[in-house]
Amino acid sequence: MTFHRSITLAALSATFAGAQTASDLANPPGKPTLDQLKEAALDAEARLPAAAAPQKGYFTITDAQRERLTKFLPRTFLKLTRRERLHIVVIGDGMLQTTVPSGDIDPLLTSFPGVFANLLANQFYFTGDVRVLRPNSPYTAKKRPMMGPEIVLQPVAASSMVQAMTALISEGFQSTPDLVLLALGFEDGISGTPLGDVESSLRSLIGAARARKVDVLVAGPMLQAAEPAEASLGLTRGVAGVLREVSTDEKVLFSDLGDLSRLIAPPAELAQGYRSFPVLVRQYQSRLIAQPDGMISPASAELHMTMGGILFQDLMEGSPEMPWAIEKITGQAGEPGHPHLSAEVRNKSKTSLRLTVLPLPTTAGKPQDANPEVTIPPGASHTFKVIYALSPSFMANELHVPLLLISGSTSRIENLKVTLLPAGVTVSTRTTFNHEGIFNPGFQIINPSNHPLVGSWNVSFNKQQASGKFTLEPEARETTVLKLDLGLKPDAPLRQKMPLKLQLDLNDQKHEFTRQLEMVRNLGLKQATPMHSSDGKESTVKLQFDADGQKLFVICDLHGLDLVDANGHAFDATLYLDARRYGQRLTPGAVNGIRIHGKAADGDATVEKLSPWAFGTGYAAEFDEKEIKALLSSTPDGLRRLTISLPRSYLYDHEWALNNGNSQLGVNFTLRAAGRSLFLTSSERHPDDAESLTVLELTDKPTQRATIKVE
C-alpha cells in the first residue's frame, strides 16, 4: 500500500473495504476497525519526512564554545551558566562615544559594550537584560523593565592606557566586578603614546585583575579615518599590535575592533589600489559621525552594533581566518634613516589571490617605495619590500608598520613589527624630577643581529660633546655613561627645550638620532610664570600658585586675551594635579585633569565632574565639583583674571607641609581662549601621565632643582 502525506478517514475506509471477517460483522459494513485505523496511521506517520525545526542560536553551547569560554573567562562563564548577576567594568576612552538614543536610554547600551552585553544576555538568560550602573545619571539604565538575572555594565572613563590600572584600582574595583572589558588604545594611537607605556600598562592591569580573581577581555582600538585618510588610518594599528601581543602572552582574549575585513566590504571588482583605497575609505567614513577638522570622529550606532557583534563572535567562536598569512617579517639596513622592510605573504586559499598592498605612514615615519600589486597562486608566497623613511626623532629597536591588504571585497590592516638593523637605540631615562644639574640621558645601543657590532658614538647637547667606541656581541646592548651639565642657574629660563643628538658610526655610515630635552625648573608659590603658546608666538598670559592651610589657589592673569563667547563658552582650562606623597609622586602614575569652562562675562565658571583618581594613583573618592571654585573677574584697570581654589581636604593623601621644598605637587595647566592654545609645560607624553607634569614646591623660595624630560 502507498500512503500520501495527507491521509483522510475516507481513504483509510476504502483501503479496508474488502477485509471483512466474522469479528467485523459487529461493525457497520465497509467501516475499518479501530485497530486497523491505528495501524494505518502509524504506518503513514513512519513515512512522513522528519520535521526540520530551525536551529537555535542561543542557550545551546557547543563543546568548542564551552572550552573557549572556560579558557578565557572561567569565572564569567560560571556565572553565566548559573544565570547569576554578572558585573562588567568597562574601562574605555573616546571609542565609547556615541549618540544618545531616543527616550534618554543610557548611551552605553547602544555602544559596542552594550551590544556585546545584550548578546551575552540573550545567549545565557531566559529572561533578564542589561543595566548600566552610572550614579546620579540622567539616563534610563535599562531598555526594558524586564525581571530576571542582569548583566550590569559599569563605565569607567579613561583617556589613555596609562590611566588604565589607576582607573581600575580607584573606581573599577569598588564594586567587586566579575569581568573587566578594556576598551582603550584609540586615543593612545592618535596621540602617539609610547608603545612601551601601552605594554607595561596592560601587563599591570592584567596582574591587578588576576590578583582580585577578575577576568579580563581586551578590545583592540577602532580605526580613525580623518583626512588625509592615508595618514590617519594606520595610527591605532601599532597599539592594537601591542595589545594583541601582550594578550596572547598573558593568555587573555583579544578582539580587534579595527579589523576592516569585518567592518566593511568594498566592491570586489575594484582591484587596483588607486581605485579601491578611496572607495574603502569612504565606506568606512560613512560609518563614523563626521566632526569638524581636528576633532575625533566617533563611531556611528551602526558601527557600534557591528563592533559589539565582533566582540561577541570572538568570545564564542574566535575571529575568522584571512585568505593570506604574513610570515618572515625582516628588516635590513639601507641608507641611514631608511630601513628596508620585507614580509612574506602566503596564499592560504585554493584559488589565486590578487592583492593590493599599501604600507601606511605613522608618527614614526612613512613609506617611500613599495610594489602594491601582485597575484599569488594557491599555496604560493610573495615577498613584499618597503623602504620606510624614519622620523629623525625615532629611537627604538623595533618599528611597527601598518600594512593595508586588499583582495576583492576583503581588506585588513596588518601590523608588522620589524627589528631594525644594523643597530637600535633607546633612551632609558624619560622623566626625572628634582634634578640638580648633571644628567645622564641613558642612551642604550642595541645589537639585534646574530653577529658582533663594532662602531663609535657621539653625543652633542647644549655646546657639549661626548664620544666613545663600542663592541657589542650578538643580541647585546650597551648604555653610554654621560655627564651632561644642564646649566641650572638662578638666572636660567624657567623652561628650556634643547635638542639632544646621538650619532652612530657603523660600517662607514653615520646614523643620526635626535630627541628633545625639556627642562623646567621647580616652581614656587607666589611666582608668576609665563605660559607658552602652541603657535610659538610670545604670550603675556601668566600663571601662579598659592596655598594656605586650607586651600590651593591657581591664578591665571589673562593678559592679551580678548575673550569672546563661541559655542557656549569663551575659554576652556584644564588643571592637572598629582597630589601623591613625595616618595609616591616620583614613581609612575596617572591623574585626570580638572576641566573648567566659562563665558566671557565676569562670574563663576563651570567645573566639570571629577574622576575618583583626579589627583593621582591611589586616590579613590567621590569629589563634589561644587567645592572647587572657579571665578572670572576684572580689575579696575581692565585686567581679566581666572582664579581657581581647591580645598586642601581633597588632597588628603598629600603631606601638605608649607614652606618645605620637598612638599610638592605635580602640576600642569592648559588654556584655550581667543583662538590660542596655551600651556605651562608641554610633553609628547599623555597629559594625564604623571610623568608629563612639572613640580610645584609648596614654598615661596623654591630650590634650584628641575624636571627633565627626554622625548
Image: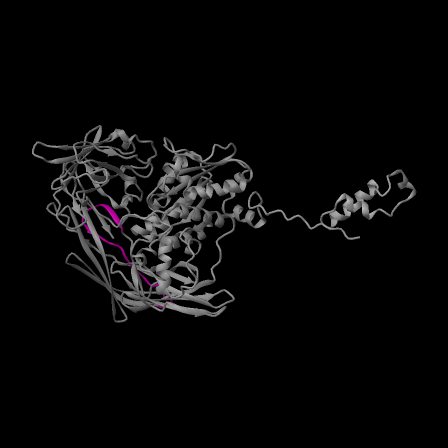
Residue 505 showing in the rendered view:
yes
Is residue 528 shown in magenta?
Answer: no
**Any part of residue 485 in sight:** no
Front position in the image: 456 or 415: 415
What span is in magenta?
430-451
- Hey, which quadrant is residue 229 in on the image? bottom left
Q: Nearer the viewer, residue 223 or 644?
A: 223
* Image coordinates for residue 607, horizontal then vertical, percent: 25, 34
The residue sitting at the bottom extreme is 508
Is residue 392 toward the left or the right of residue 251 in the image?
left
Residue 629 placement (x, y as % from top left): 22, 30
Residue in front for this viewpoint, 703 or 618:
618
Q: Quadrant of residue 555?
A: top left
Tell whether position 444 is magenta: yes
Q: Residue at the spot x=58%, y=49% of the render?
A: 63
Residue 526 percent location from the top left of the image = 14, 36
Residue 548 rendering spot, x and y as whole percentages: 19, 30
Task: Quadrant for residue 401, please give it.
Answer: bottom left
